Image (cartoon, rainbow, N blue to C red):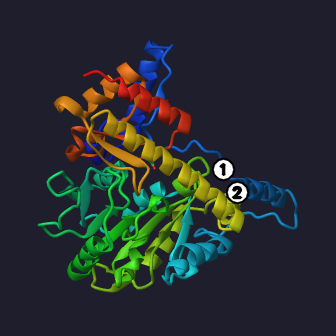
Amino acid sequence: MIKVNDNFGRLAPNYLFSEVARKIRIFQQENPEAHVIKMSIGDVTRPLCPAAVEALHRAADDQGLAETFRGYGPEQGYPFLAEKICQFDYAARGIDISPDEVFISDGAKSDLGNIGDIFSADCTAAITDPVYPVYVDTNVMTGRKIVFLPCTEANGMVPGLPTEPVDLIYLCYPNNPTGTTLTRAQLKVWVDYARKVGAVILFDSAYECFITEEDIPHSIYEIEEAKECAIEFRSFSKTAGFTGMRCGYTVIPHALKGVDSMGNEVSLNGLWRRRQTTKFNGASYPIQRAAEAIYTPSGQTQIRESVDYYLHNAAILRQGIGAAGLNFRGGINAPYVWVKTPEGLSSWEFFDLLLAQTHVACTPGVGFGLCGEGYVRLTAFNTLAATEMAMDRISKLTL
Ligand code: MLT
């Protein structure tokens, strides 16, 4: 029989969100009358904005006419979208990124999972704990050594620098799952460290649009010299409701270099281009047109309304969770609220209790890593009515 990749045997049997969905499904089958409010996976509930929908319709028409039909597109994305990204997401913040440093894809999850292809399997990955499970699982699949960086009450959820050599450093800010942030000064510590030891920071800024406070960097490239040590991942999922559309992008500056086993300097932008042109045929044309439309004046206004709607939900979560006497973090610069379980309950015990008593589904913190034990995560992505109803139910929780 064929030999399989043994590393898969080191993974949990199910991906975290599949496991949570399975548990909710079972609960719903056993309690068909229960109206379950899902505050587990961070999936959006607001529809696509009108500007994106109109662009989708126009792109569908383009595909129906010989003169405007498009077949295979550029694997790294159409220039019409890359140019908007450079202008709106970077130049507007004083950051100079050129379109050929931008790689458009079917989402940040794919890019974060695939980026490991361009690094040696011998690299050691430093990963904060708790964390978005894709970073850990994909490095386990490759068989890489992982060094965990605990984020705990003791360090205020700010990871300390590794105490052993590492090559790759995964940082996600605003953070999924804890909703916490790093200030410019705190992020600069990581950029300085990565440059000093020759590591690469893989910076996931999928939640950048939820930043409300002044001193929080929207891009790692706001930190001087980060172009020499960081790759940035962005997503349209939460910014523009694209979880079902699938579109995101990765920025790999030309200044970012690696070294091969012969000691030759290699461009990481060039390696990723080679990887993407080989394994990926580009995000679809209509989806990229829809993403382009969010950069129009009406698109910008419309997506801002949705982000503000979710931030309002987050404020309701903070208010409701606090009123229920539970300790929490997040929800100010992020759509997630990280809740300490009461009475020493484990994450899964509190998940079960919340589901059974209030019919509210959360994500158990331990699913994001061992340091997440004793916490659960709630998302602000449900509707306002469901968020209010969930908080009303949680206010009656008995322990
Ligand atoms: C989450 O709930 O953590 C995210 O929605 C999952 C994802 O973006 O893949």
In this figure, which residue is indicated by the disc labeled 1?
Answer: 48
| 10 Å crowding of disc 1: few (<14), some (14-19), many (20+) | many
Label total for image: 2
The residue at 44%/62% (across/down) is 212
Alpha carbon separation for disc pair 2 and 1: 6 Å
| 10 Å crowding of disc 2: few (<14), some (14-19), many (20+) | many
As drawn, is 85 to the left or to the right of 53? left
As drawn, is 303 to the left or to the right of 154? right
Q: Specify the farthest residue to the left.
A: 163
The type of residue carrying mark 1 is Leu
Q: Between 253 and 313, which is closer to the camera in this rendering?
A: 313
What is the x, y in percent for residue 231?
A: 40, 72
- The numbered dot on residue 52 is 2
Q: Secondary structure at mark 1?
A: loop
The type of residue carrying mark 2 is Ala
What is the x, y in percent for residue 348?
A: 27, 30
Q: Between 199 and 263, which is closer to the camera in this rendering?
A: 199
The residue at 52%/33% (across/down) is 386
The residue at 29%/21% (across/down) is 398
The residue at 36%/71% (across/down) is 215
Q: Secondary structure at mark 2?
A: helix
What is the x, y in percent for residue 204?
A: 40, 62
As drawn, is 288 to the left or to the right of 55? left
Q: Are marks 2 and 1 in contact (CB under 8 Å)?
A: yes
